[in-house]
Image: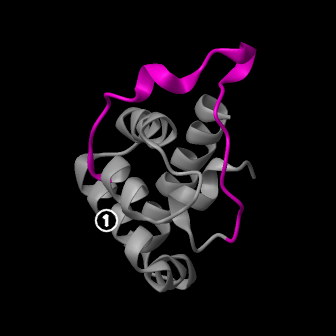
Amino acid sequence: MGRILAILALGMVVSCGGGVTRGGDPVARFASVSGPIKSACLSSGRRAANPQICGCIQAAADQTLSGADQRRGASFFGNPELAHAVRASDTERDDAFWDRWRNFGSAADQLCS
């Protein structure tokens, strides 16, 4: 997957980076977007985490995840083992969440790469 997914799940073992969208438009327009995913992204300590890229990731979250899913996913940034546990879980609830989380990751990758 793309560079954005590392910031998203941290437990998915993907590198982080990016900075422009398709067509070369800067992601700077997302700097003012706010929410739990952006906050977790900025607090993650990742070198590539900045207000623009984290705001872009939050914009993708706003388009694809409920507020509850965003709060749940934001917890992965501080606890990557939790992401692994959810992914490995075989409960219907966790499976459904993980499908939504992967969809969000794909949307963020397309929007922010």
* Left or right relative to 33: residue 4: right
* Left or right relative to 3: residue 50: left
Range of magenta residues: 13-36
Q: Position of residue 72 (x, y in %)?
A: 31, 65
Q: Which residue is mark 1?
A: 72
Foreground residue, 83 or 97?
83
Q: Amino acid at mark 1?
A: Arg
Q: Position of residue 48 (x, y in %)?
A: 59, 51
* Left or right relative to 86: residue 75: left
- Number of numbered discs on residues: 1
Residue at 42% of width from left, 55% of height from top?
A: 41
Q: Position of residue 99 (x, y in %)?
A: 53, 58
Say whether residue 32 is magenta: yes
Residue at 59% of width from left, 29% of height from top?
A: 111
Q: Is residue 102 above or below residue 33?
A: below
Residue at 54% of width from left, 25% of height from top?
A: 27
* Left or right relative to 73: residue 9: right
